[in-house]
Structure formats: C-alpha cells, structure tokens
Image (cartoon, rainbow, N blue to C red):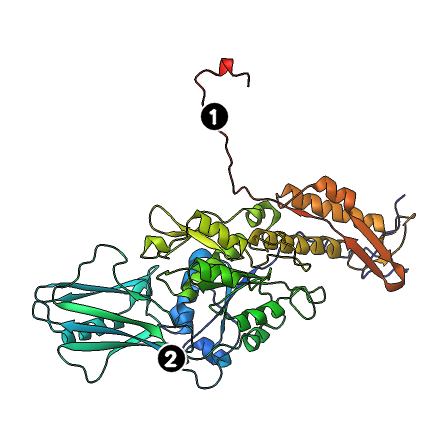
Amino acid sequence: MQGPVSFENTPSDVLVPAYMVEFNAGPPSYSGTSRQVILGRALPTSLVALRGVLTNVGSQSPAGLCGLGSMGAEQILYARQQNPIGEILFLDTTSALGANPQAATGTLTFAGTATSSGTVTRYLGGERYDVNVATGDTADVVAAAFVARFAQGYTKFNTRMLAPVTAAVKAGGSAASTDVTLTARHAGSETNGWRIEAGLDGDESEVPGITVTIVPMANGVGEVDLAAVLAKLGTQNADWLCGPYNTAAQLNVVRDFLSDGGSGRSSPLVGLLGHYTTHKEGNLNDLTAFGQTRNDRHVTIAGLYQWPQASWCISASLCGEIAFLKNLGRSLATAIEIARPMQTRVLRGLRPPKDPNALFGMADRDSLYRNGISGFVQTADGQMACDRIVTTYRVNPAGLSDRTWLDIEDIAIAAYAARYFRTKLLGTYPRCTLAEDNPAGIQGVATPQDLEDTSVHAATDLYRAGLIRQLNLFIVNIRIFCDYENDRANFFLPITAAAQLRVFAVNQTSYLDQSDQGI
C-alpha cells in the first residue's frame, strides 16, 4: 500500500485553488573532490610564503607560485606530471622551522690546468650541467664557468627551473685549486644529502688536467614542526598528503594527525580521512630496520637508495601518481582504477641510481614490502616505475602479522567505500523517523529493512564497479541494529576489498609425448 506523499515546503492545508510545484533533489549520485596536498618550502618573497595559507596550485607556474629555485616549485612540477588535472594544493612549511636554522652547504673543488679542450659535466639533483673547457684553462676559469652555467638553471617538462641551491666561487681561491660553494636556498635539514655526482648519462668524458672533488651537501640545521603545519589544514579535504618530512618525531605527528581515534582525521567523529607519502634513504638494512619501527596504515614510505633526484621531487611524484589513480572522487564508471595495482606505473622524469647495484633486486624488494617500505624498478628505457606501493602497517593491535592494510589499494578502497555508503544512506534518508516497520508506507520513515536494502544496493554498486568482492557474504553478514532510545542505527558492513593480480605462478611441464603420460 502506498503511503501519503511527503513535502518539504508545501503547506498541507490550502483552501485557495492553486497548482503548487515543489522542487527537491533526489538522492545524489556519488561524486566528490579528492585533493593532493604538498607540504614543502617556498622562497620568502613568493606569493605562497606571503599568504601563509593552503594555496590551490591550479595551472599556475610552479616557479611563479613558490619562487624560482624553491623546493616547492620542484615538488609541484613533478606532482603535476603524474596528476595533470587533479586538485593540488601547496602548504608552505617555513614558518614552522623553529629558531636559528642553518642552510646546508656542499663544495665542488676544481684543480689543475686543462691540457686539452673538452667538457666538464656534473649533475646536481639529477640535472645535467655542462661547461666547455679550452686548452690552458685553469681551475679558477673552469670554476667561474661552472657558476655561470649553474645560474642558467635547467629545463624540465618544458619549464625553466633553478636548483634549490646557489653556487659561488669561494673567496681566497687560487689558480691551482678553486672551490665552488653550493648553498641551499632554504635553511633547514631538507637539502642535506642532495646529490652532486658525475657520470649519470654514461657519455661523459673528463677534461685532461682538470680534477673535480665533491663534498656532499650537509650541515643543514632545522626540523619542520609538522604539528603546526598540519593544523593549518583545519577541516579542509586533504586525501593525499606528501612531503620530505620523515623523522620519527615527524612521522609520529602524522600518525596522530591521521589517526583512527581521538581527534584524528580518520576517527568516526571527524571522518575526513587522509594518507601521507614520504621517503627514506638508505640501503636494504637501513630501510628494513626503519620499517620495523613503524606501524601506521596512514603512511607510505618510498624506499630510496642513491636516487639522483631530490627526495622532495620523488615523494611529490609518487603522491601525484597515487592521487591520480586513487582519486576518491571518481565516479563508479572509472572507480576500478582505485583497486588496480600500481605496478609498472612510471614516475616521469626520475632517474635511476648511477650504480646498478643500488637498485633493489627481487629478494630485496620482497623484504622491503614485508617491513612496510615501498619499492620501485627500472624500466628498459631507464625510467623509474612503481613495483608495489605499501603502507607501514604490519601488525594488528595484538601484535600479530596482518596484511589487511598492506597495500595502498586497500586504503583507497576502504575510503571510497565509506564515502559511497555515506552518500547513499544520507542521500536517501536525509530527514527521517526511525521505526521497526512502516505498514502505511509513509514517506520520511526509515526501518531497519529499508536501511539494509539501501546498504545492499550500495554494496552491489561497489561490487559491479570492481572495488569489492564476495557480495553474497556481505548480504549474509550485514547487521543493522536500531537503538531507538538514542535515535541511532548501528551498521556492520562487512566488505571484502578487491584483490590485485600481482603474482603469476605457472607450472609449465614439457613432454616428449603426452599421450603416454596419463595426465
């Protein structure tokens, strides 16, 4: 039996002849905005630093936004290559650096006199800088030419850029030996370890008579207070965060900020969610040892060893790829990408390590994943590609090994499903009473069966979209308990996330004649 029609704004008792039309929106289809938020550094004179607020990058020039030669400009540049039209926001971390920070420095020492012409090539942050040398050029001439070449910057993705360090000839040098000092444009520890090296392309040749000695970038002082930075997000959507901030203290701040309990963004009372991508540099032993100290499903750590590019470029690139593929605002028609594994996805513009032995082999990567560290492989044309992107979650609260939140896909599927169920339930029942049954079929009354039917319908949508499996078990195990005294419905929604096809195990057996084998 059909019940009476419910109106929101139309009066029920009208004596005057009238034709009254009320316009209401039905339950909405799922849609949303999924943001990538970059935590990094802008130069003091840049617009971002002056605003001191979360800034939408849009299609603005990275250098124009954060300053030519800033870390932030490089972060945005790499993120945009992976996430070309997604919503990217930038949050400057300079104001949270603390007192008395110091800039990192490094040195290139040129010595000797060229006995023939040639080209001196060095790579700074993975970018190539060539200086032509004539016979008879002394160290001070080559050093000055290198400083001039360095000031010209580099071109990346058709964009003019500068490195986040400046170069200058050190005062007091001589013709026999001249130092070029590299100084970070940003004070703080972020540029410690920024790489200066030779021979990345393999086609270089040294100039006879000229030697170059490298002192790596070091002695930067100052750690960003991530708690102060993350507080600026307020209640704004920030699904995918990234930055080069990876100390134990900083990761603990991230853990608490994104926590499932208390005031964390993933807690039931907040419900904003979020995931943080960063990096860690080291050999296999260093990385696995560090991974064993973490256990957070809200953090992904890229395991790096001797990668030429700066760490902030790598974490921004990886996060951009995650934000693009795992866009939580996707419609159901394209939501399958959220569940597909990231293996083979190229991080554009990133070089492999110079030493082939610095690339982690199969056994190494297997160990990394077991310890919560993500790994990468080199493609045939010398690019770096994702292999398996994992979280640092390893054990459950009882200390037992647990793979529920191992992969980034598990995190993304759960987040998407939560928002989809929310859209379906709140969209269908925005203003309703709660009752055991509704014999008159009155609009505006919700029953446990209604809530279960809507939940099953939503789960069916997710199942057909390829995000979850075992729909039959969802239907069998769903539980909805109505607490009428507290105007509350309690839901148990047992979803099973889609698995990923990662391993092909093939038994290929050869026979001379199968007719006699009795297979």
Circle 2 — which element? strand
Q: Does residue 345 appear in the picture of this structure? A: no
Q: Are marks 2 and 1 in contact (CB under 8 Å)?
A: no
The amino acid marked with disc number 2 is Ala
Q: Does residue 397 appear in the picture of this structure? A: yes
Which mark is on residue 509? 1
Crowd band around label 2 with a 10 angstrom C-alpha radius: few (<14), some (14–19), many (20+): many
Q: Residue at x 35, y 76 (%)?
A: 184
Asked whether 33 or 249 is in front, the reply is: 249
Is 109 displayed left or right of 279 in the figure?
Answer: left
Which mark is in front, 2 or 1? 1
Q: Residue at x 84, y 54 (%)?
A: 481
Q: Which residue is mark 2?
A: 103
Circle 1 — which element? loop
Is 79 displayed left or right of 114 in the figure?
Answer: right
The C terminus - image quarter: top right
Q: What is the residue that sits farthest to the top in this orientation?
A: 516
The amino acid marked with disc number 1 is Thr
Quick check: 264 above or below 376? below
Q: CA distance from mark 2 to mark 1?
A: 62 Å
Q: Residue at x 46, y 78 (%)?
A: 49
Is 172 displayed left or right of 270 in the figure?
Answer: left
